Amino acid sequence: MTKKHVSTTINGDAIEFLCDPNDTLLDVLRKELSLTGTKEGCGSGDCGACSITLDERLVCSCLVLGVEAEGKNIGTIEGVSNKDQLHVIQEKFLEHAALQCGICTPGLIVSTQALLKENSNPTEEEARYYLAGNLCRCTGYDKIIRAVLDAADVMRGAA
Amino acid sequence: MPVIDYKVPQSVDDAVSLLEANENAKILAGGTDLIIQSRAQSSPDLVVVDLKSLPDFVSANINSEGLSLGPSMSCAEFTAREDIKSLFPGLVEAAFLIGSTQVQGRASIGGNLCNASPAADTIPALMVNNALCVIQGPKGERRVSVEDFVTGVASNCMAKNELLKAILVATPASRTSDAYLRFIPRSEMDIAVAGAAVSVTLETDGTCSKAIVAIGAVAPTAILVDAAAKALIGSKLDETSLQAAADAASAASNPITDRRGTAEFRRHVVGVLVKRAALIAAKRAGDK
């Protein structure tokens, strides 16, 4: 099988890679580019662990082919913090203990960032619906939602 | 290795040629069905043809005649369009029910239609809006209704060398609106156990002068239920007419029993959904 050459932008950096047409973008991120912050859970678009943004749109990277990244702008968990300075959302996840095993956390943080870009002041219900595609088997979600709403308040300057 | 090649054609004609030249070529829209299907052991080696670089396939335009929808436009983009929502609120609510936020970011109405699941949410909603499928093949273009497009479980009327180029939905007549409801056992992210779309036209005194009823997930394909529409027409959507429409929908259904619900439950619930959707559509039509 012939590998395809792909030019794309990931977290603001121009990136080129070769990939098999059968590889998902998740495969490429993790195996080809060593961006292992994005996790694989189900591999079928149900769990949200592999959430990334593709041209500012939240998607599951397991349901995108690597070759589809050509010319696109990709955002992953590695692009959320400002080098060593954690993003407010990350700080709030720590502060509220909104994680246990951590597999869902990168996806939840990427999704929360997408949520707060679309809606800077979500209600609890809106946050729960928006994040319904991110499954967590540890926390019971309550701490996650508290972290999300707290982060929203801080980012709006309301807290 | 199911996906063996990836093609980005520069025109619809190029895409049709690719479909003709490759035994197992498939159009890739959002991939939320196709990529998963390609992982099945039974999947043949696929050549995927991605039309999302053609602007007409990923955009929606509204003019005086109505909506021309690019089949690969993501549901997230579609449902964010207030101009579309004001014309077809039922179609937008059906699109909004498909999957999670992440799946919405990729899934498309064209994909939902071509994949032709019996439980597809947008299919009944397209039916009650008399949507037309524009199909392109080597000899040109043809147009078919959604009812004729979907031919069975996971099958559509397109030949191997044809593709869905656009979905056309005419602007609703005045005091006409639609609604879509489905039943799922949880509050989010599930597949319809039963679904119902209704479009109604109201006269100024509130009498229903026109109605279309379509039900989903209760037969191998979504179906139009003329008897349910007839029960609504001429009435002011009083309880007797609504119940008659519900009974007609239940009678027209031919559901299966599976882990999401029994046939008996589905038959009952689809009637309830028709009643409720008719009232929502009527409220919207009356507000216009």
Image (tube, coloured by chain):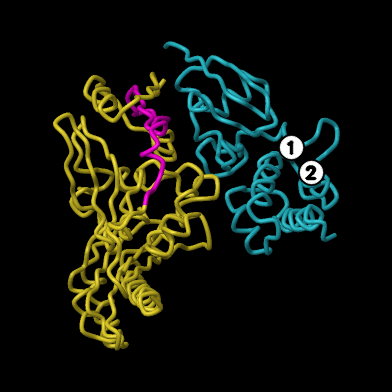
Chain colours: A cyan, B yellow
Q: Residue at x 21, y 31 (%)?
A: B160
Question: How dense is the environment of label 1, judged by Cα within 10 Å: few (below 14), some, or many (20 and up)?
Answer: some
Which residue extends farthest top?
A2
Name the one closer to the observer, A28 or B194: A28
Name the one closer to the observer, A21 or A39: A21
Q: Which residues are magenta?
A: B38-61
| Dot 1 and dot 2 residues touching (CB under 8 Å) | yes
Q: Residue at x 64, y 20 (%)?
A: A33
Residue type, label 1: Val
Badge 2: chain ID: A
Badge 1: chain ID: A
Which label's residue is closer to the chain start, 1 or 2? 1
Give the labeled residue for mark 2: A90
Question: How dense is the environment of label 2, judged by Cα within 10 Å: few (below 14), some, or many (20 and up)?
Answer: many
> Label 1, label 2: how many angstroms apart (C-alpha)?
9 Å
Above/below status of B263 relative to B25: below
Instruction: Report the quarter where the C terminus of chain A lies.
Output: bottom right
